[in-house]
Image (spheres, helix red, strand yellow):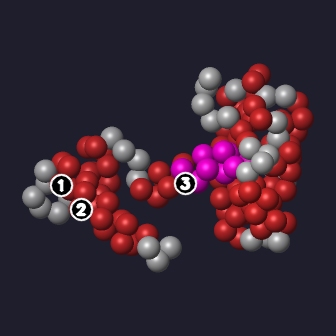
Amino acid sequence: NSNMSEINSLWYRVSKAAVGAVFNVSSVILEVILGVPPLQVFARIVAIKHYLKVFSDTQDIHQIFVISQLLERNSTIQYHLRDVLKFLKWKSGHFSRMMNKADLNIITGGDLTLLPQLSQEAYKYTRG
């Protein structure tokens, strides 16, 4: 993204100030000291949560848009939904007893167009 370089620069300055570093320090070292994931990883986590939230509410107007863009093969939507599918595959591997068989079949099938058909339980990203 074109904005990402500006955001990364700001993130670096904020991280450097939070640590109290005077000299230039690698951003990786700053993130380890602060105990936060890299900004790109954090952005992907937020995107996954966003899409799970959109799919969990059948009345959400964003869901209609996402589904239409998915059917039109929008590469950006597909990229983000592949991340959602990776998360769901991880979740099904660790918490499969919390998912029904239909959800497991959709997730293991890997068809992105079927993601909106998952049950409400499948969209949860917390343990509770």
62 up-or-down from 58: above or below: below
Quarter-of-image position of residue 62: bottom right
**Which residue position holds label 2?**
13
Residue at 20 percent across and 56 percent down: it is: 16
Residue 85 horizontal/vertical position (percent)? 72, 48
**Which residue position holds label 3?**
44
21 up-or-down from 52: above or below: below
Q: Name the disc covering residue 17, or none.
A: 1
Taking the view exactly as shown, the residue that stands out farthest to the left is: 22
Q: CA distance from mark 1 to mark 2?
A: 6 Å
Residue 55 horizontal/vertical position (percent)? 74, 47
Q: Is residue 39 magenta?
A: no
Quarter-of-image position of residue 13: bottom left
Residue at 40 percent across and 53 percent down: it is: 38
Tell whether label 2 touches label 3 (CB within 8 Å).
no
Element class at badge 3: helix
Mark 1 or mark 3: whose residue is earlier in sequence: 1
Q: Which residues are magenta?
A: 46-55
Q: CA distance from mark 1 to mark 3?
A: 24 Å
Q: 88 or 14, which is in the foreground?
A: 14
| Amino acid residing under circle 3 | Arg
| Amino acid residing under circle 2 | Arg
Q: Is residue 49 magenta?
A: yes
Residue 49 horizontal/vertical position (percent)? 60, 46
Q: 3 or 91, which is in the foreground?
A: 3
| Amino acid residing under circle 1 | Ala
Residue at 82 percent across and 71 percent down: it is: 72
Tell whether label 2 touches label 1 (CB within 8 Å).
yes
Residue 23 horizontal/vertical position (percent)? 12, 61
* Residue 82 showing in the rendered view: no
Element class at badge 2: helix
Taking the view exactly as shown, the residue that stands out farthest to the bottom is: 2
